[in-house]
Structures are given as C-alpha cells and as structure tokens.
Image: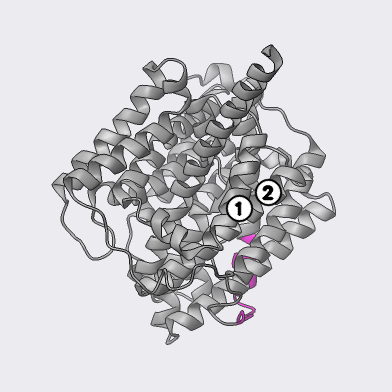
Amino acid sequence: MTIMNNSKKSWSKVTLETVQWFVFLLASAVTLPIVIGAIFDLNFTEVAGLMQRTFFAVGITSVLQGIFGHRLPIMEGPAGLWISIFAVMAYSEVAAGKSYIETLQTLEAAMIWTGVFLFIFGIFRLAHRVLFVFTPLVTGAFLFLITVQLSGTFLKGMIGVQQQAEAIQVDKTILAFLTFFLVIGLSFFGKGWLKGYAVLIGIVVGWVLYVAWIGSRPVDSLLVSDGFNVPDLWVWGHPNFEWSVIPLAFITAVILLSNLVASVVAVSHSIYGKPSYGYSQLNRGSSFLGINHVISAMFSSVANVSLASSSGFINLTGQKSKRPFLYASLLLVAVAFFPPVVAFISAIPAPIANAALLATFVQLMGLGISNMASEELNERRLTILGISFLLGIGIMFLPAEVFQGMPSIAQNLLSNGLLVGTVLVILLEQLWKEVPGASKSNNV
C-alpha cells in the first residue's frame, strides 16, 4: 500500500511538473509568432499556421536536444537573435525591392546556412575548440544583452502596444503587472507547491482575471475548421539561396555558439549548483542546433535555439528533472496536430504570457550579472563592457532606416544590436590582453 501511495504521489508530481513545463513552453512559443506576423503583415490565418508550425518545431527540437544533443532540460525556442534578424531584413530587403514573401524565402536560406555551419562545428568537434572565446565576461554580457533586447518585446506585450495599438492600454497593463509580481512573489516567498508552480499559477490566475475583466478573444472559424491537421512544409516557398547571406549565417552561427554555451552554463548551474558540462556535450549540442535550424526552416518558422531563460524557469520553480520536460515537449508536438487546441492555447492573452516570460528573465539577467562579476571587474573589463553595451544597446534603439544606404550584408550585420554587442565583447576580450598584475593595480 505504501509503495502504491508513493507511486501515485510520484506520478502526480511528474504530471504537475509536466503541465508547468508545458505552460512555460507555450508561453515562450506563443508570443513571437504574433510579433513576426506584425512585422511581415501576416493575416490571422497565416499567424495561426505559423503558431501551429512553431509549436511543432519547438517540441521536436527540444526532444532532439534533450535526448541526443546537450541532454539537458533546456527549451528550444524561437531565438531572440533571429527575431532581430527577421525584423532587420523585413525592412532592408523590402527597401531593396523584394516582397515580404521573397524576404522570408531568403531568411529560410539564411537559417539553413547557419544550421550547416553549426552542424559542421559539432560534427568535426570544433565547437569546444572555441570555448576559450566564451569567457565568463562574454557569457555574462550575452545573457545581459539578450535580456535587454527581449525585455522591450515582452514589455510592449504587457502594456498592449504590440501590432496596431500605439497607446498603453491601462486595464491590460494592470493585469499584466499583477501577473508579473504574482509569479515573482510566489517564486521567492511561496512555500511548497505554491513556489514550485509559480509560473503555472501566475498564468492561470492572470488569464482568469483577464477574461473576467476584459473578456476572451473570439477565435477565428478558419482556424478551427479542421479537427486534425499536419503542419505544412515550406509554407513561405522554397528557400532562396543567395551568396550575400552566407557571411551573416556564419557570424550568426558563431554567436549562437555563445548562446549554446551560455544556456548550458546557466541550466547546469541551476541544476548542479555550478557550471558542469563536457566538450562532447557542446559538440553534440552544436550538431543538433544545426539540425534544428534546418527543421525550423523546413516548417517555415523562426529558428529555434537553446533558451537560457529555461534556467530562470528552473530557478523559479525548483524543477530539475528532465523527464517532465521531455513529456511536455512531446505533448506540444501532439497539440500541433489539432488546430482547435492551438486556437484555444493561442487565446492566452498576450499581456499575461509576456508578463510570465518577463518574470523568468529576472533570474536570467541576474545570472548574466553574476557571470560578469565572477571575475574581478578591473578597469579593462569595465571598459570592454562599457563599449560593448553602449554600442550594442544603442543600436537596439536605432530605426532600421538609418542603415538604408549600406550594402545589404552590412545592414543585416550592423543593425543588430545583440550581434554587434556580443561580437565587440568577444573581439575586445581577445585583442586587449590582460597585463599580469594589472588586475590588482587597476582594481575598481
């Protein structure tokens, strides 16, 4: 009897943890298709199809990495770096005379090229050979920059100014911040299951309050016309391979290696209390990151990468087991085949989903700061960070139009603040060598 009771408790715990991982996967995947839809002027049906394909790709790629790649409970989700590349190319390519659909076909090719480079890095065991580049300063700076970049997207979603709305919507903003502080409060001050399921509780409570106060969003009948539907391939058309995207793809692949290292460092630290990883783990992770890029391109979605925000989720909830994560990923794959379920899930109010995601980024930014501070912040390191942050974050505030006169490859590279900031940290860290003994004499 005791064994049976323990077994029931174990399965109930796994079930609840699976549900919470599933909600986190959804919250992380549901927002960015809406953002891409707004950038490329997609209609409701096209956004719904993109969301379906995103769910499928996120689930499949997360399982592949979790079982065969780095083998950690790290969500593979739409990359913040790729979101910015999509946004930049939406302007630069259209300004050069291309249509939105032609631009999306070029982006498919860029994702495939990036995937090829990442696969080569992994299969030929090159990924771990560049580990010397990813110092704690570089890893911490990348985590800090990506939280700064995505915090703007999430905050816009919280206050209701995404898509067509331009003014803050007070009622949605109030509910979003209630959700945000509820998740933060439960994760830090809650006890037992309240602390362990802070994200799930926050989204459910926020959603209920949203429906009660504002009302639910009507579901388009086109989305639920089919009870079962297989996600389509090459919805944007076949990729348009252009030589001009190869340099962008290579640099993006190198930056995504820093993303992979940062994610593995962050999640292993959350699980084991310290960064713990091996060379073969990073090489496998790079290989499957490349495969996942090709899968994302085939299903015409934003390229998926290992999301360091998984660390924030683990820290908030205390869920360190991989099994519920894999179950949740497979559940997301299954959900993608049922448009009515996708329709219901897509009804999660954007302000609530964005608020829950922003709460997980609090931990991620803290991890980035602690990584940077793990080495003595002498004058050299502070100068490197200052230059990289001022230029990288400054570019994030510039409109894409200011780069219009440059060649397309320069536009795609220089107008991306996350990419520029991360490259600057890497280059300055390697070119400006530390003088022995300078750390003590120049200590700040």
Q: Give the label on residue 59, or none.
A: 1
Q: Identify the image quadrant of the C terminus.
A: top left
Q: Nearer the viewer, residue 142 or 183?
A: 183
Residue 223 to residue 205: above or below = below
Amino acid type, mark 1: Gly
Q: CA distance from mark 2 to mark 1?
A: 6 Å
Q: Give the label on residue 327, or none.
A: none
Q: Give the label on residue 63, or none.
A: 2
Start-end of magenta stretch: 238-251
Q: Is residue 249 located in the magenta-colored stretch of the structure?
A: yes
Residue lying at the far bottom in this picture: please name it.
97
Q: Residue 5 in the image: x percent, y percent?
A: 63, 17
| Residues at discs 2 and 1 in contact (Cβ within 8 Å) | yes
Crowd tier of the residue under label 1, counting other residues whose Cα lies within 10 Å: few below 14, some 14–19, many 20 or above: many
Choose top left, top right, bottom left or bottom right for residue 139. Answer: top right
Q: Residue 357 in the image: x percent, y percent?
A: 41, 41
Q: Identify the image quadrant of the N terminus.
A: top right
Q: Is residue 169 located in the magenta-colored stretch of the structure?
A: no
Q: Secondary structure at mark 1?
A: helix
Residue 64 to residue 379: above or below = below
Q: Residue 251 in the image: x percent, y percent?
A: 62, 59
Residue depicted at x 73% and y 47% = 285
Number of dots carrying numbers: 2
From where the camera sits, is residue 144 visible? yes
Residue depicted at x 41% and y 70% = 223
